[in-house]
Amino acid sequence: MALLLKNAHVIDPQVGLNETCEILIRDGVIVEVGHDLTMAKGVERDLGGKIVVPGLVDIHVHLRDPGQEYKEDIESGTRAAAHGGFTDVCCMPNTNPIIDTGAIVEYVRSKAAKVGKCRVHVSGACTKGEKGEALAEMGDMVAHGAVMFTDDGRGVQDSGMMRRVMDYAVQFGKAVSSHCQDEGLVGTGQINEGATSTLLGLQGWPTAGEEIQIGRDIELSKLTGCPIHIQHLSSAHGLDLVRRGRADGARVTCEVTPHHMF
């Protein structure tokens, strides 16, 4: 079956495309993008006023399976992703049990292959049970398809352990995604520390509790050569640390989301 999409605003930064044009699709595959395209037989759709982009990728999602399916599951999470234009998602390992062995990675990948509505990539935990005390079975998880490592939901508190995690990850050609949170400073903090937290009577969370680990993990990335991704960055100084690290040669990226800032 052929499908011709007309008058779409097509954006693809990889090829420098940002204009209104047409897209010809045959049997589910894009075969041509251009102007004044024709087809002998098929369906035409007018996408005037709509934007078409390559499939989006979200590298930080929570599919909650195994063990927390009352919050979300692989089918519902990937259905929502596909509905929003996401063709690939990477799920976090802070499930129950924690994704810290090859067997659990295999379980998630196998289930996603059966019920998933988009491609699912699985991240494995850095440490067993995300407790920060002993390395998780990183090699075994890589052998079963883990694409990166993170103790999402908890920062790895011990600097020596974090270095060891990066030393192993770089040997497997994988990145480490860091939940930057110094628990000694953050404690039971609920919102950013300041006048508002005082007025509301809520436990404050100083930005230093995030920034100290951002700086530490960037330095460890430079030491080990391991790519590092800073999760849910929420302060201006934290962003400055990432910029400075990149300028110094660190392989560091970051993510920013409104619900972590406001």
Image (cartoon, rainbow, N blue to C red):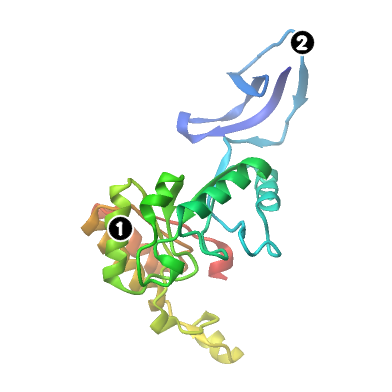
Quadrant in which the C terminus appears: bottom right
Image depth: mark 1 or mark 2 in front: 1
The image position of residue 16, as x and y in percent, is 47, 30
Instruction: Estimate the spatial distance between the alpha carbons at disc 1 and disc 2, rounded to whole Å.
Output: 55 Å
Q: Name the residue under label 1.
A: 166
Residue 119 quadrant: top right
Say if residue 85 shows up in the picture: yes
Q: Nearer the viewer, residue 61 or 96?
A: 96
Residue 112 quadrant: top right
Mark 1 burial class by Cα count in 10 Å: few <14, some 14-19, many 20+? many
Give the residue displayed 45% in from the left and 48% down from the top.
146
Mark 2 burial class by Cα count in 10 Å: few <14, some 14-19, many 20+? few
Residue extending furthest toward the top: 40
In the rendered view, does 15 fall on the left or right side of 70?
left
- Amino acid type at circle 2 is Lys
Q: Please tell me whether mark 2 sits on a helix, a strand or a loop.
A: loop
- Amino acid type at circle 1 is Met
Q: Which of 214 and 102 is in front in this view?
A: 102
Q: Which of 23 and 89 is in front in this view?
A: 89
Q: In this view, does 146 lie above or below 158?
A: above
In the rendered view, does 119 fall on the left or right side of 224?
right
Q: Which of marks 1 and 2 is nearer the N terminus?
A: 2
Residue 41: which numbered mark, if any? 2
Q: Which of 124 and 229 is in front in this view?
A: 124
Q: Please tell me whether mark 1 sits on a helix, a strand or a loop.
A: helix
The image position of residue 29, as x and y in percent, is 62, 22
The image position of residue 87, as x and y in percent, is 60, 40
Q: Is residue 160 above or below residue 197?
A: above
Residue 251: which numbered mark, if any? none
Give the residue displayed 70% in from the left and 47% down from the top.
79
In the rendered view, does 227 fall on the left or right side of 3?
left
